[in-house]
Image (cartoon, grey):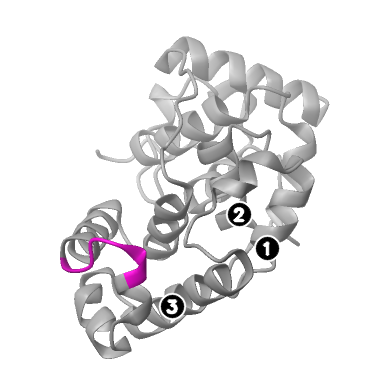
């Protein structure tokens, strides 16, 4: 099956299996960006705890920017890689403040999506997945972030060969307007059914589309 047709079929089946999802804005763009940085290579629970601790200790981004770096590191320690993350967050806040005069990313709402995306990628340590998350979840723009679950699932489905950046391979295939729902559905599929170990292939709504050897291991 043609890859573009295959991914449309996948999107339809996952919608029937999991139910439709409507886009909902995630609020403050800067909070979304920082939360995404905290989420890299850690669990959602650790990310949420670290972000909550950061906001409790420093109610404003100005306070994060002006606090001793060691204190920011201690506050987000639960997310792991805390020294690297604290340094990156501070560098980003400094860049925003210096360039925009205030600690806000609301100006991105007034830019064409391509310009907003390019600006996000210019921030220190912000890669394509992080930028795409802000664009999709914060602005509702047609970008398709690829996380670990989506990498695994799409590779098993034969949509990506594991070489190069998966954003280049997958983004052109996703039906316009289905980025948000398909992103969330593929992550759910990867967590609940197409797991790294012991995938539940018999339960998968995509099993006849998938060339991956059947797992069917214990739950």
| Residue 187 in sight from this viewpoint | yes
Q: Residue furthest right?
A: 2
- Identify the secondary structure beneath mark 3: helix
Q: Is residue 105 above or below residue 126?
A: above
Q: How far from the left and from the top, in percent, is residue 154?
A: 61, 41
Distance, label 3 to label 2, CA atoms, is: 17 Å
| N-term mark: 1 or 3 | 3
**Residue at screen point 43% across, 40% down:** 190
Q: Which residues are magenta?
A: 57-62
Q: Residue furthest top?
A: 16
Q: Around disc 3, counting alpha carbons within 10 Å, would you say few (fewer than 14), some (14 to 19), or many (20 or more)?
A: some
Looking at the rendering, which quadrant does residue 193 occupy? top left
- Location of the C terminus by quadrant is top left
* Residue 12 vs residue 65, the one in the foreground: 65
Q: How far from the left and from the top, in percent, is residue 16?
A: 48, 10
Determine whether, in the image, residue 92 is placed left or right of residue 197.
Answer: right
Q: Is residue 60 magenta?
A: yes
* Residue 75 vs residue 66, the one in the foreground: 66
* Residue, disc 2: 131
| Labels 1 & 3 near each other (Cβ < 8 A) | no
Looking at the rendering, which quadrant does residue 79 occupy? bottom left
| Labels 2 & 1 near each other (Cβ < 8 A) | yes
Q: How far from the left and from the top, in percent, is residue 157?
A: 63, 37
**Residue at screen point 77% across, 33% down:** 173
* Residue, disc 1: 121
Q: Residue furthest front?
A: 101
| N-term mark: 2 or 1 | 1
* Residue 217 vs residue 117, the one in the foreground: 117
Q: Nearer the viewer's eye, disc 1 or disc 3?
A: 3
Residue 90's mark? 3
Determine whether, in the image, residue 131 is placed left or right of residue 79.
Answer: right
| Residue 158 in sight from this viewpoint | no
């Amino acid at each position: 099956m043609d890859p573009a047709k295959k991914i449309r079929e996948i999107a339809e089946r996952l919608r029937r299996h999991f139910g439709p999802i409507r886009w909902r804005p995630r609020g403050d763009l800067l909070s979304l960006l920082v939360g995404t940085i905290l989420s890299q290579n850690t669990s959602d629970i650790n990310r949420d705890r670290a972000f909550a601790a950061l906001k409790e200790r420093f109610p404003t981004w100005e306070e994060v920017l002006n606090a001793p770096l060691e204190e920011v590191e201690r506050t987000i320690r639960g997310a792991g890689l805390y020294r690297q993350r604290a340094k990156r967050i501070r560098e980003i806040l400094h860049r925003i403040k210096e360039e925009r005069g205030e600690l806000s990313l609301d100006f991105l709402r007034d830019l064409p999506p391509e310009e907003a995306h390019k600006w996000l990628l210019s921030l220190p340590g912000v890669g394509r997945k992080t930028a795409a998350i802000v664009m999709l979840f914060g602005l509702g723009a047609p970008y398709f972030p690829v996380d670990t679950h989506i990498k695994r699932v799409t590779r098993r489905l034969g949509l990506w060969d594991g070489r190069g950046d998966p954003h280049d391979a997958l983004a052109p295939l996703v039906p316009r307007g289905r980025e948000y729902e398909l992103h969330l559905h593929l992550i759910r599929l990867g967590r609940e059914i197409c797991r790294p170990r012991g995938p539940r292939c018999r339960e998968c709504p995509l099993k006849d589309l998938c060339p991956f050897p059947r797992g069917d291991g214990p739950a």
